Amino acid sequence: MIELEKNETYKTIYNELQQLRIAFPKLPMHLLEEKLEHLVNHYNDEHNIYQQVILECLSFVSVEEPEWSYAAARLYMQTLYKEASSNRNYNIEQRYGSLYELITILTEKNIYHKNLLESYTQQEIETIGSFIKPEQDNLFNYIGIKMLADRYLARSHQGHLFELPQERFMIIAMTLMKDETKEKRLHFIQEAYWAMSNLYMTTATPTLSNAGKTWGQLSSCFIETVDDSLESIYDSNTDIATLSKNGGGIGVYLGKIRCHGSDIKGFKGASSGVIPWMKQLNNTAVSVDQLGQRQGAISAYLDIWHKDIFAFLDAKLNNGDERMRTHDLFTGVCIPDYFMEQVDARGDWYLFDPHEVRQVMGYSLEDFYDEEKGKGAFRSKYEECVNQPFLSKEKVAAIDIMKSIMRSQLETGTPFMFYRDEVNRKNPNSHLGMIYCSNLCTEITQNQSATLRIEEYIKDGRIVTEKVPGDFVVCNLSSINLAKAISDDVLERLIAIQLRMLDNVIDLNTIPVLQGATTNKKYRSVGLGTFGWHHLLALQQIKWESDEAVNYADQVYEKIAYYTISESMNLAKEKGHYPGFIGSEWQTGAYFEKREYNNSNSELDWSSLQAEVANYGIRNGYLLAVAPNASTALIAGSTPSIDPIYKKQYSEEKKDYRIPVTAPDLNAKTTWFYKAANTIDQSWSIKQNAKRQKHVDQAISFNLYIQNTIKAIELLNYHLEAWESGLKTTYYVRSTSSEIEECESCSS
């Protein structure tokens, strides 16, 4: 207890709370809130009574009494109302003040961008302000409102709170809809606010934090492709630092860089390989933090046939030569089918220097993939390299590489697995390029290419650098709260506004790396995702480890895919298709044929949709991606992504607080359907994700949860099963003994 013995007031409060505890949950929430409010007001905020009562309410939170989190949230909201009303000089009884006055004040303070006042008249803003529903604040539990207030609500430069939760949602809606036609934009603002305020969806962390403000950008993650030249390496590092400063998470493909011991300009053994460049990226991640809130987040990917692969796999280990370690980078391996086949068969594998392959063979091995399972261009080119006597190579047992992968995963959670053949086989824009790797959180798979510096010269007293921009991947994310959206049967309406919001981010965003801005417009890529899967299963009373859950995943994600493609087609009718549509698998129909949509027994009219897409196009070249979204799922009071819960009750620990959290909607009916992640047979998770992946044109942040006592053969079998099932990527291997840093850039 909090000094109860030292203060009679606290003793009295504690006793009164215990009486309320006996009455609750028999007391309806609104009556409990009234009694708590009366209790607090009785003491006239003596000795910071609000905070003490909140802490006592939180101490009651348990599997048996989860609703006390909402009681604490109600009291915490009162402190926010009090602070905002005091700073903005309005009556606290209103809870929310004038939206127009808020925008005016924060524009004058250079917190909000002036374009809000330039885009909307005072009358329009006052009308928009009337859409706000303060009662929607009651949907938050304590961890949700605490996280939203601490990280995302607008404050003055001195840290004083001005913005309240429903105003944050409305400012996002106003920002994203400001360039819509004046006849329709107030309707779209209402719809966007409806979606966010009901917690049917969340926007990506950068959008949630930065929309309407004078700093930052709105996109979540980026993928850079580094060419094998000094200029490209250093230019990429500058671009990565710039994005990291603005709050982006970055995936970096290093597979084109020559290996340790390769030649430079004919000088044998001169290259130091990829590790020194990884050290440079590691320093960038540490030194260029994200908006002063956390250090940068960067993942590096390397091909499994690269000669530096063993050093790469050891780079995050806690022992060995520290000069070869990059503890602050995340790692991922790019794996062709052929390698997994050799692992399964306990066969040999050959390692090459990509620079030497280009010099001797005249092509880049990473530019090929197997077009079909068991045959294709990659294995053909790989065998050519194996059989070329003038090409140096290193022969190893494929299983030895896999052992190094698993050793690192058990110690650090990484490397992530990127199954390059499956990714490229299912790439709807393969007519325009190649996908080499994924992003920081393994859910984005889009065409990539390196930006090349062509010439640098002096003109009119200025240094001019000419570059050919590559495909610098940008992902724009938001996620559906499955538990709420499906329970309330609003999926079709929700996706319609959600995709419009995502599409508008593309035009509104100010990406500080020009090739990223170019790529963003070229593909108009978005990543509509989901969270709350375990929450949904519990509400539906479906056991995780069951065929019912596997089939339900198939049904839910097929419906999401159908509505998303339909809405992108509707946006194309209205605003035009993305520039790369002609020749894409969207246009040719191959996208639908590969997934056998027209041969299924689905109730959805895929044939008509395919014909409409071919006729009108779609607005967005990439559409679906399921991100980790751990923090925003907490804000929405649900479960992260497609993951099972960690425990029915645990403590969310951050730098400045420790808050009890229980599984959502935990009661006598749902408790039997919440099983802790590390106790679940991961084969069932893989089966679910294979069904889900069919309907997701990009990829899914899919974690494997294991016990620290797992045998190597068991983990190996999980990886083989994931690959054989057609998963495109796997994210962390989460052991019961390892702590893993969450990525917040992709949280949506």
Image (cartoon, helix red, strand yellow):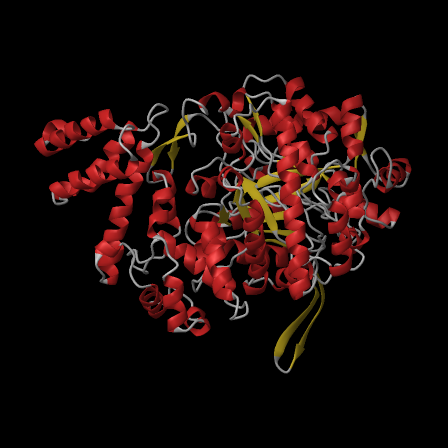
Residue toward you, 219 or 130: 130
Q: Where 150 falls versus 522 (above or below)? A: above
In which quadrant of the rendered image does the N terminus lie?
A: top left
For residue 336, say whether it is visible. yes
Q: Where 546 falls versus 417 (above or below)? A: above
Left or right placement of residue 595 versus residue 706 in this view: right
Q: List the single residue furthest toward the left.
A: 8
For residue 397, say whether it is visible. no
Left or right placement of residue 477 versus residue 565 in this view: left
Q: How many marks?
A: 0
Q: Position of residue 428 (x, y in %)?
A: 75, 49
Residue toward you, 548 or 601: 601
| Quadrant in the rendering for residue 146 | top left
Q: List the single residue furthest toward the bottom.
A: 460
Residue toward you, 413 or 202: 202
| Quadrant in the rendering for residue 92 | bottom left
| Quadrant in the rendering for residue 276 | top right
Q: Position of residue 139 (x, y in %)?
A: 38, 42
Q: Where 8 falls versus 236 (above or below)? A: above
